[in-house]
Image (cartoon, rainbow, N blue to C red):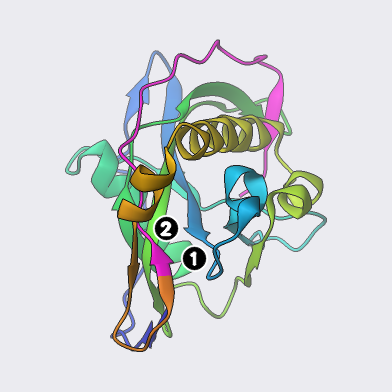
Amino acid sequence: MELKDMVVLVSRSGRHLQRYNKGRRQVVGCIPYRYKDFIELSLVDEDAFEVLLISPQRKGKGLLFPKGGWEEDETIEDAAQRETIEEAGVRGEVECKLGTWYFENKTGDTAYEGHMFPLFVTEELDYWPEKEIRERTWMNVREARKLCQNGWMKEALEVLVSRLTSQISKQTKGELFQGIERTSSGRTIILPWGCRAQILSPPLSNSTEEA
């Protein structure tokens, strides 16, 4: 994937447009993912792709997926893309929603309704609004399970893993290679498959989050 320059943007600030639902602050986030460059038999399992995590604003243990407030002047997909650009410096195709989660902050004084999407990364930026305060790291699914600090985000990750491995494993050999093309440089890339809706049971309400 080629790194591309980008004019430094400014993150949105303030909450005057923040959406609420029955007193819960609505937030939206993405799990950025990409397929690995090589193609071999491991493609049928979770080793075929990797995900991008970021460090929290307040230094501490664990990593996060990008997420933030959903505001009244944007669609939920636009909010997911914006937050991912602001916090992780990547953009791409926002796919079908993974689910909705209900949780509170660590002090228990704020309730949230969180919506998570997969984002198939097509561009990785050199400059992004929160570059100076966050680090971003690509890793495999096993590493992400260990390092992601929020339980509800881990649940979203498992939904994504189930979805992607199911889609990959259901392809015939012929169909699989229809989803593969080579770039002008000769690198092999794998195109995303169409998403399939999944029903997710509401998670436990005592999850906590970190910004």
Magenta residues (range): 189-211
Which of the 4 image quarters holds residue 60? Answer: bottom right
- Secondary structure beneath disc 2? helix
Residue at image position (58%, 28%) is 110
- Which residue corresponds to mark 1? 88
Give whichever of 207, 100 is nearer the camera.
Answer: 100
Report whether residue 17 is seen: no
- The answer to whether 78 appears left or right of 155 in the picture is left
- Secondary structure beneath disc 1? helix
**Against 111, is 154 above or below?**
below
Residue at image position (53%, 36%) is 160
Residue 184 point in image, percent of width and height: 29, 86
Report whether residue 34 is seen: yes
- Which residue corresponds to mark 2? 84
**Against 8, is 188 above or below?**
above
Residue 194 within the segment the image draws in magenta: yes
Residue at image position (20%, 39%) is 75
- The answer to whether 146 appears left or right of 56 in the picture is right
Residue 188 point in image, percent of width and height: 43, 72
Q: Residue furthest left?
A: 73
Amino acid type of the residue tagged 2 in the rendering: Thr
Q: Residue furthest front?
A: 174
Residue 163 within the segment the image draws in magenta: no
Mark 1 vs 2: CB contact within 8 A: yes
Give whichever of 40, 207 is nearer the camera.
Answer: 40
Q: CA distance from mark 1 to mark 2?
A: 5 Å
